[in-house]
Amino acid sequence: MITCGVVGATGTVGETMIKVLQDRSFPAESFRPFASAKSEGKCVRFRNRNYPVEIIRPEAISKGMIIFGATSANIAKNWIPMCIKAGALVIDNSSAYRMDKDVLLAVPEVNGHLITGEENIIANPNCSTIQLVVALAPLLQLGKIRWVSVATYQAVSGAGTPAIEELQRQQNGTLPVNPADRIHENIITSIGHPDAGGYCSEEIKLMNETRKITGQNFPVFASTARVPVRTGHTEAVAVKFDNPVQRDEAISILEESPGVAVSESGSSPLDVEGTDIVVVDRIRNNPGDPTVLQFWVIADNLRKGAALNAVQIAEEFLEKRKI
Ligand SMILES: NC(=O)c1ccc[n+]([C@@H]2O[C@H](COP(=O)([O-])OP(=O)(O)OC[C@H]3O[C@@H](n4cnc5c(N)ncnc54)[C@H](OP(=O)(O)O)[C@@H]3O)[C@@H](O)[C@H]2O)c1
């Protein structure tokens, strides 16, 4: 019997996780939602039943349990060791263990074959990384990638419930703020604090995680920005290969790739909200350099960018455990 738990069940990713587990009929016979002391005793609905939110404690965890993490990295570091010790599998959405060399950072379409069914923790990548690698990995069939350039237009839901509420309050004029801190009618060009070299933490995650998941060492030139969109991350991507590449060939490859939908219509975040696909739009050959392809990548950051990817990891884990 599989018991699944969601830690951070009252947050933006946790709530989406519960929806995705239901949508995909995840084979869990029982369910336990966890969150902070603030939410203890609140009810969370899963498959037409109410479950009281608990604080995560060792006695709540049992061997074989599958626990989805949807808390910040600092909080994840407090509860994950306890779950591993109890023999549970943790699939964590935070950045706490993503770059740990002993922890698999998984996107099932790209490196799902590395899941063994024996892990005690698997990390779920950053939302902007997941959609990028789903589009990028199949293109390795065209040749060796020399570099990737990506500029992101990231939705506020990527920063959780407080950021969604902040945008809503700025839109209806109930939250006056300095122009520099405002997201409504604005673009914030640094997601997380810049390091000594000037890169913000979101850019560092996108650069490092892309290389770890694809197993390639090409440089990624990332520029990340937060835009006043509720859900759906958009990325403008350029890929430089060692050899000339054909747009038509890239389209054929991506049309056959799992989780991808190719479009020519100029898709928007509103088109992908609530869907499970990564849209690769307006693939084009650069007229000045036949070794460069440009395209847009758009996906729902809460589904493929977080909850869906985590549930797909759990499904792959269970498949492997059967063998
Ligand atoms: N949003 C995205 O698109 C996205 C994508 C990929 C990865 N992620 C990552 O996923 C994680 C969750 O993000 P989010 O956007 O869902 O944040 P969020 O909306 O702020 O939710 C945070 C959750 O953590 C819970 N929490 C806080 N303190 C806790 C504690 N001491 N013990 C247990 N639970 C606690 C909160 O519970 P209370 O309600 O009780 O405070 C809430 O359920 C973050 O690490 C984020 O970086 C997010």
Image (cartoon, rainbow, N blue to C red):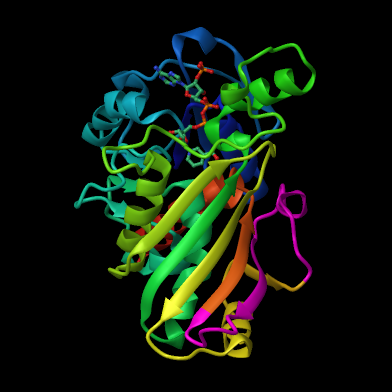
Q: Give the residue at the far front of this rendering.
A: 288
Q: In this rendering, is residue 311 above or below 168?
A: below
Q: In this rendering, is residue 4 above or below 209?
A: above
Q: In this rendering, is residue 95 above or below 265?
A: above
Instruction: Name the residue located 48 percent from the left edge and 79 percent from the top edge.
Output: 139
Segment tinted magenta in the rendering: 265-292
Query: Which quadrant is the C terminus positioned in?
Result: bottom left
Residue 143 x %, y %: 40, 86
Decide whether residue 268 is among the magenta residues.
Answer: yes
Q: Is residue 92 visible?
A: no
Q: In this rendering, is residue 264 above or below 55?
A: below
Decide whether residue 117 is among the magenta residues.
Answer: no
Left/right of residue 222 with respect to residue 52 in the rendered view: left
Numbered marks: total = 0
Nearer to the camera, 159 or 14: 159
Nearer to the camera, 241 or 270: 241
Instruction: Name the residue located 63 percent from the left edge and 22 percent from the top edge.
Output: 179
Instruction: Name the residue located 41 percent from the left edge and 28 percent from the top edge.
Output: 72
Quadrant of res 76: top left
Residue 41 x %, y %: 55, 10
Nearer to the camera, 243 or 96: 243
